[in-house]
Amino acid sequence: MLLAEELLLLALDPEGGTPVNSSREPLRVSLCGALVAELGFAGLVEEQGRRLVPTVPPADAMPPAAASLPADAMPPADPMLPADRAPLADHPLLAAYPLLADVHRALGTGRGRRAADQLRRLDRAVGGVWGRVVDPLADAGVLGRRRDRVLVAHVTRHPVLRPAVRDEVVRRVRAAAASDDPLDPRTATLLALAGPSRLLEVVAPLRGERRHAKARIQDATEQTPVAPIVRKVIHEAQAASAAAVTAATVSASS
C-alpha cells in the first residue's frame, strides 16, 4: 500500500468519510509529498537544484507493500509510480516537487493568498491528488463513495468499508508514536507527515500521550535512515502543509 493511501486512511473519520479536524487542505499537501517521497523510496529520482530528475533504479528498489496487510486488502499499483525510468521524464510528480517548496516560500513572505494559489498549482500538477489517492482505495472496496446534501451543497464522503485495513494502519502508527523503539523508514515517514496533516489526536488519542507523540513526530525522519531525497521531500511537505493551514485561514477571513 502506498504511503499516501495509508496517510489518507489515517486521516478519514471511518464512518463520516471526511478528514478529521478540518484537515483536508494540509492533508492534500501531505498526500502530494507522500507520493513524491514514494518515488524516492523506489530509487527512481534524485535532486538537481530544485528539480527532481529520473535516475536508474536498482532492480529490487520498488517499495514493498506493507507486510502486515493481507494481500487482498491492497489496491492495485498506482500508475503514477512507474517501475522503470522511461515514463518518468514528464512525470507529474517531478513537477510537483518544486511546488512543495513554492507553497511554504509563499507563506514565508506573509502572502497567504499566494500560498493558496500555489496550493492550487500543486493539486493541478498531480492531476487532482484527492482522486489519485481515493480512487484506487474505492476501486478496491476499502473506501465507499457517498454524496450527501449539507445545507445547500453536496459533499462527497468516503466511509471506510473495510475497517480492518484502516485499523492496522492506525495501530502501527500509534505504536510508533508511543514507543521509543527505532522506526522503520516507511512508518517514520508516515508519522512525520501525520503531524502537519493535523492528525495528532488520531496518532495519540489520549491527551497525556501527545507530548511524547509530538516529539516522535518531530524526530521521526531525523533518526531514521531514509534516502536524502526522501528526507528533503518530507521537510518540504511539512512546511507546505503548515502553509496550507495558514492559507485556508486567510481565505476564510477575507
Image (tube, helix red, strand yellow):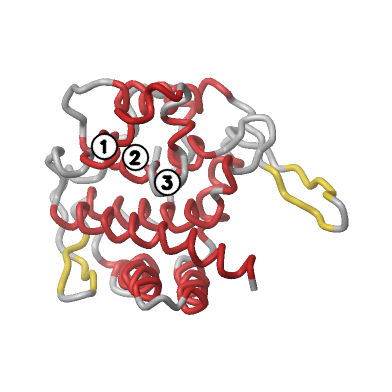
Q: Give the number of marks.
A: 3
Mark 3 Cα shell of 10 Å, populated few (<14), some (14-19), many (≥20) = many
Q: Quadrant of the N terminus?
A: top left
Which residue is drawn at the image coordinates 47% and 25% (left, top)? 205
Residue 57 visible to the viewer: yes
Q: Of marks 2 and 3, which one's residue comes earlier in the chain? A: 3
Q: Which residue is mark 2?
A: 190
Which residue is drawn at the image coordinates 59% and 43% (left, top)? 19
Look at discs 3 and 1 and give the one toward the viewer: 1
Which residue is drawn at the image coordinates 20% and 52% (left, top)? 231
Q: CA distance from mark 3 to mark 1?
A: 13 Å
Q: Label 2's element? A: helix
- Identity, as a three-letter code, of the amino acid under mark 1: Ala
Q: Which residue is mark 1?
A: 188
Q: Which residue is mark 3?
A: 4
- Identity, as a three-letter code, of the amino acid under mark 2: Leu
Which residue is drawn at the image coordinates 69% and 35% (left, top)? 16
Residue 71 place in picture, x, y as percent: 42, 26
Q: CA distance from mark 1 to mark 2?
A: 5 Å
